[in-house]
Amino acid sequence: MSVRPLLTMGDERLLQTAVPVTDFSSVELSELIQDMHDTMQAHDGAGLAAPQIGAALRVVIFGGSDNVRYPERPEVPYTVLINPHIDVLDSTQELGWEGCLSLPGLRGEVPRFTTIRYSGFTADGTPLEREAHGFHARVVQHEVDHLDGLLYPLRMPDMSRFGFEHALDL
Ligand code: NI
């Protein structure tokens, strides 16, 4: 296990489009997923995308029961999602506050679709498909954006709703 350094906003590797995983049996992939898990846990994150630790692969992880950064949030199952695809099931969007381990200390209000279906593959290559609502749907959209080089401030319609967590009145 190892906790890897997190890339932060401004690093051009966070702006790249990640490439799909083709070999689900490689040692490199299982080590990457383990390192992502350890890194997310070490920082109490709600999710993490592979590009955030410098791996340009379409791998995201999210959820877990021991999240202390968002204790008020409904539980999202711990999920490894590879080569994800999102279908928007309802065009309704909702504003909500987000943070990101690549923007430490900051929060911003971001519109996200409230109801989606996401699909992809688990760590061993098994297909996975789920419907998600609310915070669960928000986390998935946030993480999948990382695979296309999008950090949440790029989704924000109102930059006056962006700032340091300790200074914002949330
Ligand atoms: Ni993020």
Image (spheres, rainbow, N blue to C red):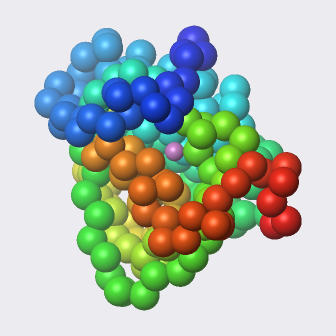
In the depicted structure, whether residue 46 falls above or below residue 42: below
Q: Residue 72: image x %, image y %?
A: 79, 63
- List the single residue furthest toward the left: 22
Count of all numbered marks drawn on residues in the image: 0
- The quadrant of the image that shows the N terminus is top right
Q: Quarter of the image holding residue 57?
A: top left
- The quadrant of the image that shows the C terminus is bottom right
Q: Residue 169: image x %, image y %?
A: 85, 65
In the depicted structure, whether residue 121 falls above or below residue 116: above
Q: Is residue 71 left or right of residue 106?
A: right
In the depicted structure, whether residue 75 falls above or below residue 61: below
Q: Quarter of the image holding residue 109?
A: bottom right
Whether residue 33 appears in this view of the structure is no
Q: Quarter of the image holding residue 16?
A: top left
Q: Residue at image x 38%, y 73%?
A: 116
Q: Residue at image x 42%, y 56%?
A: 154
Q: Residue at image x 50%, y 25%?
A: 7
Q: Residue 77: image x %, image y %?
A: 57, 54
Q: Is residue 20 left or right of residue 128?
A: left
- List the single residue furthest toward the front: 160
Looking at the picture, tell me which residue is in the foreground, 154 or 148: 154
Looking at the picture, tell me which residue is in the foreground, 32 or 162: 162
Q: Residue at image x 32%, y 54%?
A: 128
